[in-house]
Image: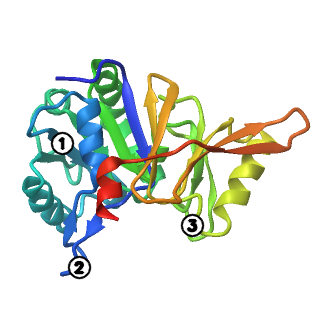
Amino acid sequence: MTADSPTIVASSIGFRSIGRGPLDWRPGPVFRYAADLAGAGARPRICFLNQATGDPADLLAAMYPAFTRAGFEPSHLALFPMPNVEDVRAHLLAQDVIWVGGGSVANLVAVWRAHGLDDILRECWQAGVVLGGVSAGSLCWHVGGTTDSFGPALRPFTAGLGFLPYSNGVHYDGEEQRRPLMQRLVGAGTLPDGYATDNWAALVYRGETLAEVVAERPGAYGWELRRSDDGTVVEERLETRLLPEAAQEM
């Protein structure tokens, strides 16, 4: 099964820790939600792309048991030092969900473009495979946003894949400089109008249209940023729905 229209879940949502160690995780409700958007069955196929952190083995070692226990059929695509699957296109098109991890968005999109993955991912998106991700894995689908890819200080990033014609602010309620920098960049026209997510919130796009904002925790919201003619930026908090599974966990 596939989504009935091209779908992207662009989030600031991480994994849930189960407390036994730094990589003892369980998947939160956003993953099952993404699978439902794909029309997946009882055992959704989810493929992880972790090029933003260089395909670290310890991350994969944590992901596989976490998602297997949760009823998913996990796989991954590695590009370091070379692709781990013979036919990258066929593998990705066979998924219900492709999820992209956080890290350096600048490195991520550069490596993808070198491997022709930008075109393959666009084909997957248009074919109904749900694309999703956190942080860099959210920003990459947009025109650009802010990033610490180039060092500790946040800088503008404008080389996103552009599947979505907007700017994207991740971890909007996080570090103090994220919110004002996004507003300055949109106001200056460096970035187009766009959307942002607090930690634990996600934007859901159907085609190029924002369809919904969801969250895994109360008080996490999505935001819209619009530039006025005078260069000021209007920030609007968007209606945000708490995922039912998240509400049950509170």
Q: Which residue is mark 1?
A: 46
| Residue name at image x 43 percent, y 43 percent | 10
Image quadrant in which the N terminus is located = top left
| Residue name at image x 25 percent, y 78 percent | 22
Q: Nearer the viewer, residue 82 or 74?
A: 74
Q: Is residue 50 visible?
A: no
Which residue is the extreme one toward the right? 230
Q: In whole angstroms, how far apart are the C-alphas of marks 1 and 3? A: 28 Å
41 up-or-down from 151: above or below: above
Residue type, mark 1 in image: Ile
199 up-or-down from 58: above or below: above
Q: In whole angstroms, how far apart are the C-alphas of marks 2 and 1? A: 24 Å
Q: Nearer the viewer, residue 77 or 220?
A: 220
Callout in the foreground (2, 1): 2
Q: Which residue is mark 2?
A: 19
Dot 1 alpha-carbon crowd within 10 angstroms: few under 14, some 14 to 19, many 20 or more: many
- Residue 236 location in percent, x, y? 70, 44
Looking at the image, tell me whether mark 2 or mark 1 is earlier in sequence order: 2
| Residue name at image x 17 percent, y 48 percent | 76
Residue type, mark 2 in image: Gly
Q: In whole angstroms, how far apart are the C-alphas of marks 3 and 2? A: 22 Å
Q: How is the image coloured?
A: rainbow
Q: Which residue is mark 3?
A: 174
Q: Is residue 116 left or right of residue 176?
A: left
| Residue name at image x 68 percent, y 66 percent | 177
Q: Tag 1's secondary structure? A: strand
Looking at the image, tell me whether mark 1 or mark 3 is earlier in sequence order: 1
